[in-house]
Amino acid sequence: MLLGPHFLVGAAIASNFQNPLAGFVIAFLSHFFLDRIPHWEYSIEPLKEIKTKGMGYAMPILRRVALDVLLGFIVLIIASILARRDISFIQAAVGGFFGILPDGLSMLLFLKRGKGIFASLLKIFYLFHQKAHYDKKANPPMRIGLSTQAIAILLAIYFLIF
Ligand SMILES: [Zn+2]
């Protein structure tokens, strides 16, 4: 899914847990659940060639990624201003961070040179993440692929505010 909905769902989950740690774990796990729902997303293929072709080549995508997260963050700010209950903004934002962390770890793999144990762990995690993702060959039409994310975003906003 796009990073915005991942971020908001993670934030909504974390803000509904008394125990922040449990909230962060579930926010992290929510990423894989959301990735199983057919959705539309922009291609991040150029990021995989960052090591050979350099940062400049991947810049347009990196800008898109930054905007994606920023929009999620702005919606979280607005939702927490409108919230009808006491929510910890920090706890929600950290939950959002855990919601997008699996994609962040993939990014780290694309950036990382060398073959240490950390790189191997990233690689294993990446393969698991890919496996958990719904089959990209069965991409839904764009209107469906965006609707599923709109629903995720609206539910997240609802559970942040109420
Ligand atoms: Zn993902």
Image (cartoon, rainbow, N blue to C red):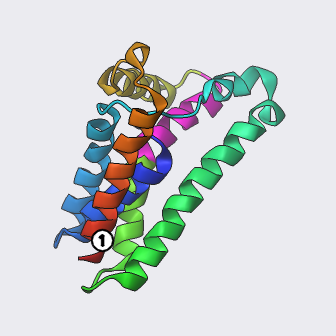
Residue 77 visible, this orientation? yes
Is residue 107 rendered magenta in the image?
A: yes
Residue at x-position 42% and y-position 21%: 139
126 or 83: nearer the viewer: 83
Q: Which region of the structure is painted magenta?
A: 101-114
The residue lying at 56 percent from left, 36 percent from top is 107
Point out the image quarter for the C terminus.
bottom left
- Crowding near the residue tagged with mark 1, few <14, some 14–19, many ≥20 C-alpha atoms within 10 Å: many
Residue 85 position (above or below residue 127): below
Tell me where residue 31 sits by quadrant. Answer: top left
In the rendered view, tell whether residue 136 sits above or below residue 3.
above
Whether residue 124 sits left or right of residue 67 in the image: it is: left
Q: Secondary structure at mark 1?
A: helix
In percent of the image, x 56 and y 37: which residue is there? 108
Give the quarter of the figure containing the N terminus. Answer: top left
**Image position of 31 with respect to 127: above or below:** below
As for residue 140 lying within the magenta part, the answer is no
Residue 56 locus on image (x, y percent): 83, 35
Residue lying furthest right: 56
Which residue lies at the image location 26% right of the left edge and 44% below the top edge?
29
| Main SS category, magenta section | helix
The residue that label 1 is drawn on is: 160
